[in-house]
Image (spheres, grey):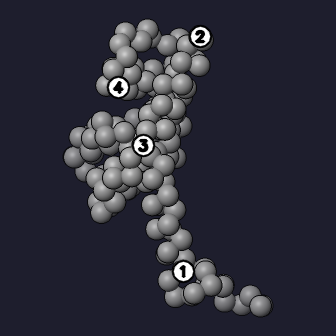
């Protein structure tokens, strides 16, 4: 099996086993939500030459995926408005809890939560959706 295929196969296994309660860690914390949004907008790539996978436990595989992931931490941090000194610990927590994925995506339940939150912003004030711009004809 090609190593690139192995990387994606292992990542897909984590995504297939997502649990919805994971978003409870994030949903009511504005800074954690900002980190997740920033991550989804950060350029991420995997190493061309993957390191050997030495174990098959979930934790070993998860760590292997992240060791073989490259991104600019500086770019990522710039995308997080009003970040503070806790930011590194919070990022590590989101990675450990498998909210941030090493391919630049986020937990699918969190993605759905964020999508619904954005839609609800547009629906407030108008039962039919986003408000029309003034001056536009209907």
Residue at (52, 62) in percent of width and height: 115
Q: Is residue 23 above or below residue 91?
A: below
Quick check: 118 left or right of 66?
right
Mark found first going from the N terminus, 1 or 3: 3
Identify residue for label 2. Answer: 1
| Distance Cα–Cα, label 1 vs label 3 | 29 Å
Residue 107 in the image: state x and y as whole percent: 44, 46
Element type where label 4 sits in the image = helix
Residue at (57, 87) in percent of width and height: 127
- Please name which of the two marks, 1 or 3, marks the residue nearer to the observer: 3
Mark found first going from the N terminus, 4 or 1: 4
Dot 4, how many residues are within 10 Å of its Cα: few (below 14), some (14-19), or many (20+)?
few
CB within 8 Å, label 2 to label 1: no
Identify residue for label 1. Answer: 123
CB within 8 Å, label 4 to label 1: no
Task: Look at the image and tell me in which quarter the C terminus lies.
Answer: bottom right
- Please name which of the two marks, 4 or 1, marks the residue nearer to the observer: 4
Mark found first going from the N terminus, 4 or 3: 3
* 105 or 16: nearer the viewer: 16
Residue 18's tag is 3
Residue 27 in the image: state x and y as whole percent: 34, 60
Residue 61 in the image: state x and y as whole percent: 38, 22
| Distance Cα–Cα, label 3 vs label 2 | 25 Å
């Amino acid at each position: 099996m090609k190593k690139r295929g192995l990387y994606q196969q292992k990542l897909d296994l984590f995504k297939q086993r997502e649990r919805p309660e994971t978003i409870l860690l994030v949903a009511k914390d504005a800074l954690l939500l900002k980190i997740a949004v920033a991550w989804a907008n950060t350029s991420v790539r995997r190493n061309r030459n993957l390191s050997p996978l030495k174990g098959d436990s979930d934790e070993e595989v998860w760590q292997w995926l992240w060791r073989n992931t490259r991104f600019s931490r500086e770019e990522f941090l710039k995308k997080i408005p009003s970040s503070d000194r806790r930011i590194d610990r919070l990022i590590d927590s989101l990675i450990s809890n498998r909210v941030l994925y090493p391919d630049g995506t986020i937990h699918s339940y969190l993605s759905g939560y964020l999508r619904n939150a954005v839609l609800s912003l547009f629906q407030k004030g108008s039962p039919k959706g986003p408000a029309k711009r003034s001056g536009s004809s209907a």
